[in-house]
Amino acid sequence: MAPPNRTVHALLGFLTWHPMSGYDIKKSVDASISNFWSESYGQIYPMLRRLVNDGLATDDDATTTGRGRRVYAITRAGRQAVQRWLREPDPPSVLRLEILLKLFFGNQVDTPTNRRRVETHREQQRELIDKYRNIGRTLRAETGDHPDLPYWLMTLRYGEKQARAAIDWCDETIAKLNALSAEGKGGTR
Amino acid sequence: MAPPNRTVHALLGFLTWHPMSGYDIKKSVDASISNFWSESYGQIYPMLRRLVNDGLATDDDATTTGRGRRVYAITRAGRQAVQRWLREPDPPSVLRLEILLKLFFGNQVDTPTNRRRVETHREQQRELIDKYRNIGRTLRAETGDHPDLPYWLMTLRYGEKQARAAIDWCDETIAKLNALSAEGKGGTR
DNA sequence: AAGACCATGTAACAGGTTACATGATTAT
DNA sequence: ATAATCATGTAACCTGTTACATGGTCTT
């Protein structure tokens, strides 16, 4: 009865590499896939219990040290679940971009307000590109021969491309906003 | 006590145009902002009640016809809430792209599986571009003089740019996957 | 001794989807 | 008549975040 759950699969994915604690997983998620995925402790800890319950992971392990730390290891069934999941088609991902929702109603506020919003977005995307570049550099340097590295870089590259496209759009949109406001002020009527 | 809620603001946004029923709003959402926003009936109907309760909309209206249909109108307080919201900065939007999560663990499956995933994504994005172009054409034709039109087109344009970037990435990634698998088969070891 | 940070966990809540139930109206 | 679709609504459920509580360990 493997649950068709995304968090579960993310956790199992990390456990395929080596046994980890909830804390480790959280750290790994933040450090490696935070540009397209997130998990909170409130999800992680209960889910790990559930994995054990479903026979997809174990914690009755010598590696679970005496006090604080509880280390989980993936089971054969767990690996099979990952394999199944990795072969499933992807459900379309629903996204909700509040910036676009606001811009959609942009005619109800003044141009500077809209422009400021787009400019802020531009800055954020600019920062993201730098972040991605740095992560890429670190990855190449520290794990240059890891067989998973090419896949990690592909996911980074996706973020980079999206951010570049977003910046393009911001520039174009700022120009349009300016044109609109010029029209409204001086122009033909 | 205006709630800091996204659905609420989406609903109010539509109500700024003219009074609408829950059903109307759902239709409008699907027809105009579905590429970056969604609302389900399960959200809409209870939320409309709440708007009335909070004094941001009314339904004690002559427009609410005898039987089925219940039409909501925005109040002054509602308009003020929209204005406040439109001037707020945008929270960073968290996205979770399952395709990237799977590709991140791509080394655990064969290249054709990964490639198929990326190719499917490419096709979906290709279709999206067509869809956006059609919506744009319809909008221009049917509401060519509406003062909100430029803003609507901007949000469409965002989707178009993102989709184009995604296609670029797909092409690049497919090439990389092929190179990886060629390496693995014949190559240096 | 203090502060950072390792580490686990839960409770409360918010946000959201799906599936179902119900019935009116309109078009064929 | 029948089918489509207009139209509202709820219950069950899942997903997810935030805030809090708790205590160990390591460094200065």
Image: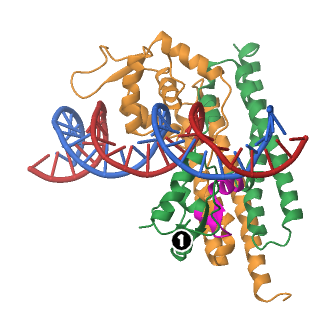
Chain colours: A orange, B green, C red, D blue
Q: Chain of mark 1?
A: B
Q: Amino acid at mark 1?
A: Gly
Can the viewer see residue B156? Answer: yes
Question: Is residue A122 at all visible to an observer of this figure?
Answer: no
The stretch in magenta equals B12-30
Q: Nearer the viewer, residue D10 or B163?
A: D10
Residue B187 image-quadrant placement: top right
At horizontal 61% and vertical 74% (from top left) the residue drawn is A113
The residue closer to the viewer here, B167 or A94, is A94
Residue at the image point whose x is 49% and y is 21% from the top:
A17
Q: What secondary structure prevails in the magenta region? A: helix
In the image, what residue occupies the spot 53% across and 75% down?
A: B80
User: Residue most toward the top?
Assistant: A76
Q: Which residue is mark 1?
A: B78
Q: Position of residue B17 (x, y in %)?
A: 68, 69
Place of residue A85 in the rendered image (x, y in percent of width and height, measured from the top left): 60, 22
Quarter of image, res A43: top left
Quadrant assignment for the C terminus of chain A? bottom right
Residue B188's place in the image compared with B85, above or below, is above
The secondary structure type at the circle numbered 1 is: helix
Q: Which of the two residues, A55 or A162, is positioned nearer the viewer here? A: A55
